[in-house]
């Protein structure tokens, strides 16, 4: 049995990952910013470097950590305020950096770090500038940290999901027309489910996969790499 820390475990993907890991017999410590969604093991502002470090020091040791913190902002750059930009960067990139920093300090015997990027960092989508900047930063962080911490057998990988059906993305798929358009963007024509991403996170956390590091796994129904032929609707 392994012990894992899930930062922002109150997210839908975090909850799905928790369920998978616990089914496998692992121990999970979940954090959240508040207690309105779940009753976390630790209330944590994951943008606070010192607070994240204390979780590792006081609740560890951990065999792995996954970071699910993030936000959603769909605006072109010229309509994005500085406050909104800062919030996106803090939610996605600063939290990831804080976790890597703490893992490097405390997981001296190795383990796994899994970060959450996005298909928006792998391909160009209109009105995604702030999110793409943050999530592309997560990819850069993943690659550099994987190189830095390989000497202590600390593996660092990232997942880049497509559009996943969660509470966070509900506004994008609220109408039948919007849902159909979102489905059609993916070569495998459906939205992702939290457990699709959760299974990939669990795979990368698994100590059995100790020879995988510095990878960005696209769990996106082909969104970032595949351009299928147009489907013909039968008459």
Image (cartoon, rainbow, N blue to C red):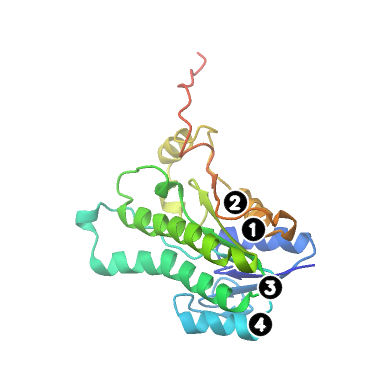
Q: Which marked residue is nearer to the observer: mark 1 or mark 2?
A: 2
Q: Earlier in the sequence, mark 2 or mark 4?
A: 4
Q: Residue at x 61, y 66 (%)?
A: 151
Q: Residue at x 43, y 64 (%)?
A: 92
Q: Quadrant of residue 126?
A: top left
Q: Residue at x 53, y 33 (%)?
A: 189
The circle drawn on residue 16 is: 1
User: Residue 75, percent across and down?
Assistant: 28, 53
User: Crowding near pointer 4: few (<14 within 10 Å), some, many (20+)?
Assistant: few
Q: Is residue 188 left or right of residue 200?
A: left
For label 3, the residue is 109
For the residues labelled 3 and 1, the Cα–Cα distance comes to 27 Å
Q: Secondary structure at mark 4?
A: helix
Q: Residue at x 39, y 42 (%)?
A: 123
For label 2, the residue is 197
Q: Earlier in the sequence, mark 1 or mark 2?
A: 1
For label 4, the residue is 59
Q: Which marked residue is nearer to the observer: mark 4 or mark 1?
A: 4
For the residues labelled 2 and 4, the Cα–Cα distance comes to 25 Å
Q: Earlier in the sequence, mark 2 or mark 3?
A: 3
Q: Which marked residue is nearer to the observer: mark 2 or mark 3?
A: 3
Q: Earlier in the sequence, mark 4 or mark 3?
A: 4
């Amino acid at each position: 049995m392994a012990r894992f820390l899930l930062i922002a475990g109150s997210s839908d993907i975090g909850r799905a990952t928790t369920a998978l890991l616990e089914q496998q017999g692992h121990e999970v410590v979940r954090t959240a910013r508040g207690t309105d969604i779940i009753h976390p093991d630790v209330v944590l502002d994951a943008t606070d470097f010192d607070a994240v470090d204390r979780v590792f020091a006081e609740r560890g040791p951990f065999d792995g950590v996954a970071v699910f913190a993030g936000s959603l902002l769909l605006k072109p750059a010229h309509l994005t305020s500085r406050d909104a930009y800062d919030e996106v960067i803090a939610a996605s990139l600063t939290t990831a950096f804080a976790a890597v920093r703490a893992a490097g300090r405390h997981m001296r015997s190795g383990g796994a770090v899994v970060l959450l990027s996005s298909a928006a960092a792998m391909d160009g989508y209109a009105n995604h500038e702030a999110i793409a900047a943050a999530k592309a930063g997560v990819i850069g962080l993943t690659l550099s940290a994987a190189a830095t911490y390989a000497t202590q057998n600390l593996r660092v990988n990232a997942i880049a999901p497509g559009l996943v059906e969660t509470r966070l993305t509900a506004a994008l798929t609220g109408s039948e027309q919007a849902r159909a358009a979102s489905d059609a963007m993916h070569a495998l024509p459906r939205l992702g489910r939290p457990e699709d991403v959760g299974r990939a996170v669990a795979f990368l956390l698994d100590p059995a996969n100790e020879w995988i590091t510095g990878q960005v796994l696209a769990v996106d129904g082909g969104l970032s790499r595949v351009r299928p032929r147009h489907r013909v609707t039968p008459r």
